[in-house]
Image (cartoon, rainbow, N blue to C red):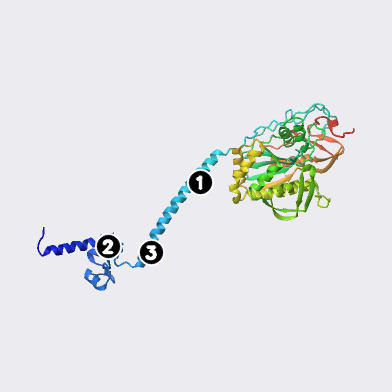
Amino acid sequence: MMSGPMAPQSARWNTMRALQKPPRNRKEIQMQLFGGKRNGRHVSGAAKHDSGHGTINSDQDTQYGKDPGVSPEEYTAEAEKRGTRRWMRRTLTALGVIALILAGAYVAFQIWVTPPEININTPANPGSTNSPGDGTEGTPKPEDTEQPIDAEAPVQAVTSGRRDGTYTFAIVGTDVISGSTDTILVGMLDTADGKLNLVSIPRDTLVNTAYDVKKINYVYPACVNNGKDGMAALLDVFEDLLGYRVDSYALVDVEVCAQLVDAIGGVWFDVPIDMDWDAPDQELYIHIKAGYQLLSGEDAVKVMRFRYSNDGKNTYAGGDIDRIQVQHDLLMALAKQMLSLGNIPNLGKIAAIYEENVTTNVTARNLGFYAKEFLKLDSEDITFQTLPANYWGSLYGEGYCFPYIDEWLAMINESLNPFASDITRANIDMLYSDGISVYATQGYIRGGIGSFKHYTP
């Protein structure tokens, strides 16, 4: 150990070394070994001391780790850079976690959703059970024999394969009081072409049933009132009209429609006319002014149901067909709003209402599939049409809608046919009339010609 006069000098040296912080990097080591730079030249420690740069200014600077010779502005910039880098790392980490969660949820949803079952080969109308009675009298279509056919001719089945990505369905709206089906839509979703086609069937359309009132909206309540399955009967009628069995169906009460509209916050719609109609027998009181407005669920249903005005002034000139057109316009407005990104959070509420209140063969997983496919569509991909017919027909004192068979077959094959081959007369079982005689595509009238209400030979 060193003693004598050198000991105090050594102690002072050790104290000075302790006060100085160690160099942080290679550059600092070089500066301490060789001195700083001034104008590109190395400067000795003494020169730095003389110039007032590179020295320890105070114990406080040493205490907080400030690098001698670095300005406060440089410290601030460096601190901001470090803070920005930390914020970016944390943000990217959070986004990565969110992306993983969303990816997992998407994969889980894709696994969970299931397309509805489809009818690959449909045996069209073998022994339809949509109405009681065993009629044996009928009038054949004009191009066939003039003699009535006494035995029911079998309808030919569609045997060609289904086109990929096509799903057929029927939506029926029932009146809460009368139970009649005033709103009837058949449709097809084509996921391959990205199209959704819907066709309204007028409530007074002539159909081949054994009931005395042979209107499509009469089938459901007549079956229910006779203790039969009204929806099963309607599915048989749809098969008669289309030539195939629809894959999915939904029977919706009008009050449920109101809940569905409210679930998305109402619907903006341009009401075409002033609507004033009081129908106490239906518990229906409609008072809505014309114009563009936000309709609540209740008001939207009233617009869909409006047919007459109290004073007769604002009744639709085209009758039920004008009413159907207004329904189409309202449904299109509703579709545009439901397909918007803002309503994606409401899909859960819509699904819950649907599952609890709608009579259907569509499961929650099927509904998820339809929702996923519908969200891929633009409003331009959705079409609404109406069954082509003489909408002002009359037969034995009853107003009927007489289908135009050839035009109807063209519409089916253009918009509703899920099969690779065309639907023809051989595949459908329909009645039509010129207002005098009744004709049947299969040469057979269920219940016979005498089963018509008010029939007179």
Give the mark nearer the N terminus: 2 vs 1. Answer: 2
In this picture, residue 117 sits left or right of residue 150: left
Label 2 and label 1: CA atoms lie apart by: 48 Å
- Given contact means CB atoms under 8 Å apart, are the residues at marks 3 and 2 in contact? no
Give the mark nearer the N terminus: 3 vs 1. Answer: 3
Residue type, numbered disc 3: Ala
Q: Which residue is mark 3?
A: 77
In this picture, residue 22 sits left or right of residue 347: left
Q: Is residue 141 visible?
A: no
Q: Which residue is mark 2?
A: 28
Mark 1 burial class by Cα count in 10 Å: few <14, some 14-19, many 20+: few
Residue 259, position in %: x, y?
66, 45
Mark 3 burial class by Cα count in 10 Å: few <14, some 14-19, many 20+: few
Label 3 and label 2: CA atoms lie apart by: 19 Å
Dot 3 falls on a residue whose secondary structure is helix
* Quadrant assignment for the C terminus: top right
* Quadrant assignment for the N terminus: bottom left
- Identify the residue at image location x=72%, y=28%: 126
- Relative to residue 318, is residue 135 depicted above or below? above
Quadrant hosting residue 422: top right
Q: Nearer the viewer, residue 45 or 455?
A: 45
Residue 356, position in %: x, y?
64, 38
Residue 141, position in %: x, y?
82, 34
Quadrant hosting residue 81: bottom left
Dot 1 falls on a residue whose secondary structure is helix
- Relative to residue 30, is residue 278 depicted above or below? above
Residue 40, position in %: x, y?
28, 70
Farthest residue to the left: give it. Answer: 4
Give the mark nearer the N terminus: 3 vs 2. Answer: 2
